[in-house]
Amino acid sequence: MNSFALADCSTVEAALSQLKDGAVVKAGGVDLLDRMKNGTDTPARLVNIRNIAALRGIHPTDQGLTIGALTTLAEVADDPTIRSQYTLLADACGHAATPHIRNMATLGGNLLQQLQCWYYRSADFQCLRKGKDICFAFSGLNQYHAIMDYGGCPSVAPSSGAVALLALDASVELTSAARGKRTVAIKDFYVQPDANPHRFHVMADDELLTAIHIPKLAPGTRSAYQKYGEKESHDWAIADAGILLEMDGNICRRAVVAMGAASPVVRRSHEAEAVLTGKPITPETARAAGKASMTNAMPLSMNGYKVQLFPVAIYRTVLLAAGQMDRDPSAAG
């Protein structure tokens, strides 16, 4: 690991004043320290925002819910309001990583973590994401990579929190000393690699992610999240699904099917949503939605299993959200 200076900040203003000359923000530091140890990131200065109290907390509002970016995954998962009303977010945060990491890692950091592609994470490979013109995953080890929408880079979206927040139509608050605050919807926050392979999100170098805003849910909303990994506990997702159902009696008035580990950014399956909308939730409609989610899937040489796994994940998570199935004991976490 390279030597670096540390700026320890206790206010947002102080942190923003340090965001210059290539400084990198550290919150929980879980993902950042991994990248520094791997040699992927070599910042000359870290801006520690861990002690900014104003960036923590879960606050119900007239419009829904605001969560401070430094609120830990454990705090989100354990919050009674989130667990009862925004169940898929509690499940996504509560089944990420290990209990120890959930007590360190923040929701903002979970949204900002970089891809888990082992070629990108290794200092030995200079790939498309690092300014070169090659992706090693296409002809190399690609069993954990994308099966949809990948273009020139089949890395996958790593954030479980983003899957849930996409389903909830959430947005993030970005703050800059020069321009003040702006709000960006989660659906617009991440950058497809074909649009710009060198950026993962639209946040500028002089901005902090300061809060997450979740709109109030419609009456009759039910939701669930499940992830699947090679191991049943504490594993990275190889397929995960966030499901939101707005129910009118036994009819689904509106459905959202969000997917992680399928493409370079978290995505909605509008094909699966169309299968569920306007119909009762039954094992048959849930299975049809899972099948529809794989429309236009293009697996690589070693990850064809995902084309079979995602329909199962969506089928089971739809029924879990509808209260017709218990949580899958084989799901990871």
Image (tube, rainbow, N blue to C red):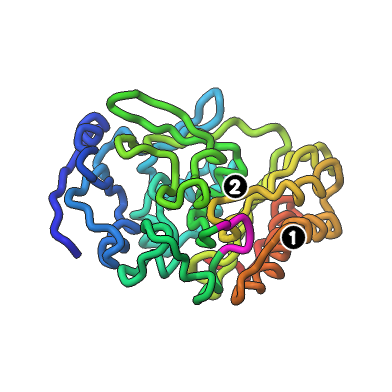
The residue stretch that appears in magenta: 146-151
Magenta segment, prevailing SS (helix, strand or loop): loop
Residue 87's disc number = 2
First-in-chain label (1 vs 2): 2
Q: In the rendered image, is residue 234 in sight?
A: no
Residue 200 at x, y percent in the picture: 44, 49
- Is residue 30 or residue 112 the one in the foreground? 112
> Which residue is drawn at the image coordinates 39% and 33% (left, top)?
174
- Is residue 41 or residue 49 the one in the foreground? 41
Whether 11 is drawn above or below 292: the answer is above
Left or right for 78, reference 245: left
> Which residue is drawn at the image coordinates 35% and 43% (left, top)?
70
> Which residue is drawn at the image coordinates 40% and 64% (left, top)?
127
Residue 241: quarter of image: bottom right
Locate the N terminus by quadrant.
bottom left
Amino acid type shown at disc 1? Tyr
Residue 11: quarter of image: top left
Left or right for 68, reference 332: left
Question: How many C-alpha atoms fall within 10 Å of the one at disc 2: few (<14), some, or many (≥20)?
Answer: many
Q: Is residue 150 magenta?
A: yes
Q: Nearer the viewer, mark 1 or mark 2?
A: 1
Q: Which residue is mark 1?
A: 315
